[in-house]
Structure formats: structure tokens, C-alpha cells
Image (cartoon, rainbow, N blue to C red):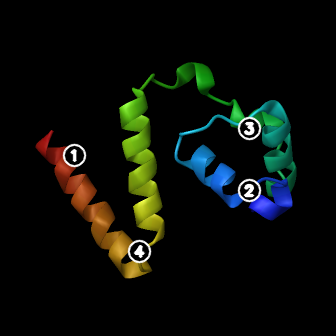
Amino acid sequence: MADRVGRTPESISNIERGKQLPNIETLAELARVLNVPLTDFFEGLEKRRTISRERAELEAELLETARQLAPRLVKVAVEQVKALRQLG
């Protein structure tokens, strides 16, 4: 993905983890590579709840960790997170 967008893997990783915000040029390249309209990145933006930077980083870490799991373990992880949600 990084090569296709013309950015470093570290830069793309930082965007994915919420440590860096992409500029409009990067968003345009991502939209082109993903074959989606640029506006897709902004849909529902006004409806999204605001979360703290710490929460955004934790959610990004959770996603990054899940991506490294075998598919059968992702299913287990999802069930565990759902169980945690039930605890409140």
C-alpha cells in the first residue's frame, strides 16, 4: 500500500494507528489506490463521536494486534471483546 501511495510504510502505519493525520494529497492517493471517492473518507464525520487521543491509540493498537492473528484467533478475540462489552 505504501509504495502505491508513494509514502513510507512507517507513514502509512502511523496514519492507521492514529499517530499521524494524512494531508489532502495523501488522502487523494489513498482514494485513488483503493478506488473509492475521496468523499468516502469524510462520510459520517459529523456523526462520529469524539474520542480521546489515548482511546484512538488503543483502538489502533487493538486493530493492529488483531491483524497479526490467525483467522481462527481473530474470531476468539472478537468474542472476548464482545464479552468485555457486556461487563460494561
Residue labelled with disc 1: 85
Corner quadrant of residue 57: top left
- Residue 46 shown left or right of residue 27 in the figure: left
Q: Closer to the observer: label 4 or label 2? A: 2
Q: Indicate the amino acid at tag 4.
A: Leu
Residue on which disc 4 sits? 69
Q: Is residue 88 left or right of residue 62?
A: left
Q: Do the CB atoms of the residues marked 3 and 2 lie less than 8 Å apart? A: no
Q: Position of residue 19 (x, y in %)?
A: 54, 39
Tell which of 6 and 28 is nearer to you. 6
Residue 81 on image: x %, y %: 26, 55
Earlier-in-chain disc, 3 versus 1: 3
Q: Which residue lies under the disc numbered 2?
A: 8
* Residue at (78% x, 39% y) in the render: 27
Q: Nearer the viewer, mark 3 or mark 2?
A: 2
Task: Evaluate if marks 3 and 1 touch, with contact meaning CB atoms under 8 Å apart.
Answer: no
